[in-house]
């Protein structure tokens, strides 16, 4: 293992780092996954728990990841090994690399759908005027064998291309332009959506909790997983990004900025999608196709809808790319260091493997529709379940315990830039006790091992 004599890359500025971390966080998770999971989990009550998970568990762990990465200046496995050589904490590092493979494999499939829709708006809009409307159009596309895989391939090609070019010129530069644009567009679309007939029903669904939903144990794990997925947490994406940050930058402000912008994105995306869902009579629990069915209906209804559709799917794809890049970077940074491969060769090699692993997730909607793994889940859902429900929360728990118990208190407070302040001490107690315990309880409760 030779890490010392190859100079490591760094972000150009603190803002560049924040935008890249935000680029990792904001992606399909905020729009595609958030809306369909919120739809399946009953809306407002789920969203409240989700926001609580972000603030009380996600944000402190996000700080922990930034702190670990910045201190070690290494990839996710190397970070644990350098800070605590020979200790089992590194398990979280290996789980992180595994999660990168699993998540990016199915993430590429959904991102491919988004690219396909973009291509449809380029040629004048999807043909949803027939009897089955946007639902039939979506079903025809995503159950096919070749087209979705081709789009997944194109997505992976671009993602690999950016990682191939490198941290500063590739990742940082693209996020600086695309993130603000996406924010503006989602706000405009949400504004339009709120003028639709179904808006009040949507507001009700999103903000008036049906407390009885809280008696369903699975809602807690769904909310916790969504918080981890959406913040790119628990698998070292933010350790890896933190490792390209210089020692002189302050961490807590960046962490708060990323967590709050990420949740805001999700809520506004909800305001964009659910009025359409209720106006056009789509079932909120339609599953992973929800945004691909609801949004084309809005665009078909709007004046200049084709242009909005075009812009929207372009930006959704861009957001997916910046998240995909961070997923790939976790694995690439590890293999590059471990085997002393070049960045170029590693990104192409790992990208190809991940693309191949993703193919069954795509076929699971068509040719392999009969295959179910992990309960009644289709292939893509099983991949998501394994990573988001198990690896990310477990990884997050180990990361929290690592900072809380594996580091000296003064060291953790110094490396995080909190110093010996009240906030710093609260943070430490959260990562020591509260966050790991909360994750454990949610796990045991949702899997039925413990009931209250
Ligand atoms: N946070 C991304 C999203 O919300 O789409 C997904 C993701 C990216 C998860 C990177 C995990 C990760 F490491």
Image (cartoon, rainbow, N blue to C red):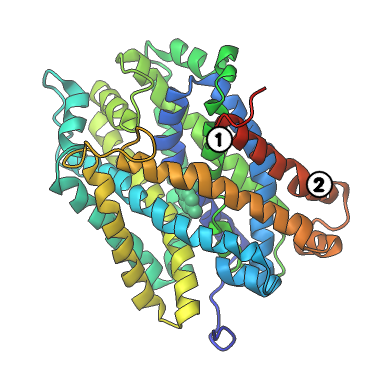
Is 345 rendered above or below residue 2? above
Is 171 rendered above or below residue 370? below
Is 49 rendered above or below residue 282? below
Query: x, y percentage for residue 415?
Result: 76, 64
User: Mark 2 sits on what residue?
Assistant: 429
Question: In front: 413, or 194?
Answer: 413
Marks 2/1 in contact by CB < 8 Å: the verdict is: no
Secondary element under disc 1, as helix, strand or loop, is helix
Q: Residue at x 49, y 30 (%)?
A: 268
Q: Residue at x 60, y 14 (%)?
A: 211
Query: x, y percentage for residue 223?
Result: 55, 32
Q: Which label is found at residue 396? A: none
Query: x, y percentage for residue 112?
Result: 27, 47
User: Mark 1 sits on what residue?
Assistant: 264
Gap between marks 2 and 1, in whole Å? 26 Å
Tell whether 50 sits left or right of 302.
right
């Amino acid at each position: 293992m030779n890490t010392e004599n190859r100079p490591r890359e760094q972000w150009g500025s603190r803002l560049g780092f924040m935008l890249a971390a935000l680029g990792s966080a904001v992606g399909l998770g905020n729009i595609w996954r958030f809306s369909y999971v919120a739809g399946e989990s009953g809306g407002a009550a789920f969203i409240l728990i989700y926001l609580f998970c972000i603030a009380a568990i996600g944000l402190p762990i996000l700080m922990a990841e930034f702190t670990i990465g910045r201190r070690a200046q290494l990839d996710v496995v190397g970070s644990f090994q350098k800070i605590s050589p020979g200790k089992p904490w590194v398990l979280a590092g290996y789980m992180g690399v595994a999660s990168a493979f699993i998540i990016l494999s199915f993430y590429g499939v959904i991102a491919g759908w988004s690219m396909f829709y973009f291509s449809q708006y380029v040629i004048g809009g999807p043909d949803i005027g027939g009897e089955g409307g946007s639902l039939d159009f979506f079903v025809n596309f995503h159950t096919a064998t070749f087209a979705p895989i081709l789009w997944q391939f194109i997505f992976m090609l671009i993602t690999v291309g950016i990682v191939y070019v490198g941290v500063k010129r590739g990742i940082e530069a693209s996020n600086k332009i695309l993130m603000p644009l996406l924010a503006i567009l989602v706000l405009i679309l949400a504004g339009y959506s709120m003028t639709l007939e179904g808006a009040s029903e949507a507001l009700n669904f999103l903000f008036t909790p049906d407390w009885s939903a809280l008696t369903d144990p699975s809602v807690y794990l769904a909310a916790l997983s969504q918080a981890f997925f959406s913040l790119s947490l628990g698998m070292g994406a933010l350790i890896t990004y933190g490792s390209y940050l210089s020692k002189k930058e302050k961490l807590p402000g960046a962490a708060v900025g990323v967590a709050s912008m990420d949740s805001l994105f999700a809520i506004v995306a909800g305001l964009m999608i659910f009025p359409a869902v209720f106006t056009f009579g789509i079932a909120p629990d339609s599953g992973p196709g929800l945004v691909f069915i609801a949004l084309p209906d809005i665009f078909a209804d709007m004046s200049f809808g084709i242009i909005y559709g075009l812009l929207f799917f372009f930006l959704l794809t861009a957001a997916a790319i910046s998240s995909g890049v961070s997923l790939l970077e976790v694995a690439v940074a590890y293999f590059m260091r471990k085997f002393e491969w070049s960045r170029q060769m590693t990104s192409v090699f790992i990208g190809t493997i991940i693309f191949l692993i993703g193919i069954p997730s795509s076929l699971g909607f068509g040719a392999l529709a009969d295959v179910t793994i992990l309960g009644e889940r289709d292939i893509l859902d099983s991949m998501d379940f394994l990573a988001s429900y198990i690896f990310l929360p477990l990884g997050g728990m180990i990361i929290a315990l690592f900072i809380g118990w594996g580091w000296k208190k003064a060291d953790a407070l110094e490396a995080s830039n909190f110093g010996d302040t009240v906030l710093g001490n609260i943070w430490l107690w959260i990562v020591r006790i509260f966050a790991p315990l909360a994750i454990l309880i949610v796990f045991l409760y949702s899997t039925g091992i413990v009931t209250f």
